[in-house]
Amino acid sequence: MYKIKIFNNIPDIIFDHLTPDKYEITDKAEEAHGILVRSANLHEMELSPSLLGIARAGAGVNNIPIDKCTEKGIVVFNTPGANANAVKELVLASLFLSSRRIYDGIEWVKSLKGKGSEIPKLVEKEKSRFSGPEITGKKLGVIGLGAIGSMVANGAHALGMEVTGYDPFISVKAAWSLSRAVNRAESLESLLAESDYITIHIPLLPDTRNYINREAFSKMKKGVRLLNFARGELINTADLIEALNDGTVSCYVTDFPTEELLACDNVVPIPHLGASTPESEENCASMASSQLQQYIETGNIVNSVNFPDCEMPKEDHLRITVAHKNVPNMLGQIASFLASRNINIAHMINKSKGNTAYTMIDIDGEAPDDLFQKLSEIGGVIKVRIIP
């Protein structure tokens, strides 16, 4: 029986994968084989020897101590794309919010409370203060064409916008999902210069922090409308405020409000609602629990942030999994040991990701009693598992 610790409220759909015949929910992190988490901070949590994997029901993993997990061979999963439709819908709604001054108009109308029969006349008289352009025929620049960016680009095109995307690292999967009508920007600079609206959908990394800064703003059209539903730190706040004040940016819609931004005109602050739909939460929970189940039961890895994706069908063989450093001769040492014990390898796969690697081996027959210990003693090996 495997034990799972759940942090935060996670939908019961997880029990479609973590079934009661094999899994038990525990309150004790120190005895857990797996952890499911949303936003809880795990950085101060002790990582027990029994812990095999942590699955984050969402894309960001800054609440998980990735380096510490890697050192102990704990596989960390996330759920890219599970909340993509929810974020896409809010981004598309925000195109209208940024254009038609809906947010400002509603706030003004609410201020008329108590005016009684004067309200209809006041509304008719002042409505022109909140006019704004239609989005049809306007140019949208999409920075980042992953799961969310591709869906936003396709959706905006369906709404009649002329869409250009920029992503030098676009995956084959994302490229296949992109409408042929979406144009490819030759450079970030050309996208910034030509777009009436810009939406950003890239991960927050050391290299992308302050990705949109004074230099980027200097290349934009006067009056551009900017949307950020990725991460607040992708945009330099001081430079953004300067661009808002001088009219470079006519409206900024963000899911990541800050004290400085709340003091600015022409900012539409949204309380991080991008993935806040019941469908999104269920999708994330289902994907996270399925990935954790597959890893625990078969050793297969899908959507890990610290180890390579590695899958091999589980047949009627004893399976050995080895998480190890990505250094020369690891496979040779593992295979040599198995050969020295006259163990035949039925199937094997090895994948690497940066400084880490992962090997799965299916063997014929039984494992010798010292198999786990001897493999664990090989230099560079991080964690060994034997899965019946």
Image (tube, rainbow, N blue to C red):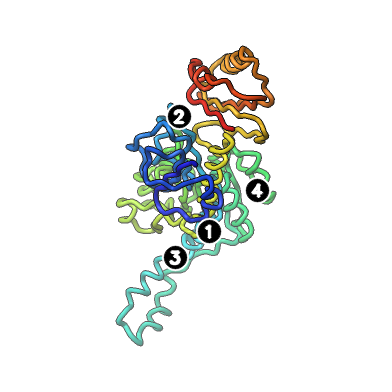
Label 2 packing within 10 angstroms: few (<14), some (14-19), many (20+) = many
Q: Is residue 164 left or right of residue 243?
A: right
Mark 4–mark 1 CB contact (< 8 Å): no
Could you say where residue 13 lies in the image, as x and y percent from the top left? Answer: 52, 55
Marks 4 and 1 sit apart, C-alpha to C-alpha, by: 23 Å
Which badge, 1 or 2, comes first in the chain's sequence? 2
Which badge, 4 or 3, comes first in the chain's sequence? 3
Marks 1 and 2 sit apart, C-alpha to C-alpha, by: 31 Å
Instruction: Give the residue at the far bottom of this rendering.
Output: 117
Residue under the point 46% across and 68% down: 131
Residue under label 3 = 101
- Residue type for callout 3: Arg
Q: Does residue 224 appear anywhere in the picture?
A: yes
Label 1 residue SS: helix
Camera-nearest residue between 68 and 112: 68
Which badge, 3 or 2, comes first in the chain's sequence? 2
Residue under label 2 = 70
Camera-nearest residue between 326 and 292: 292
- The mark found on residue 178 in the picture is 4
Mark 1–mark 2 CB contact (< 8 Å): no
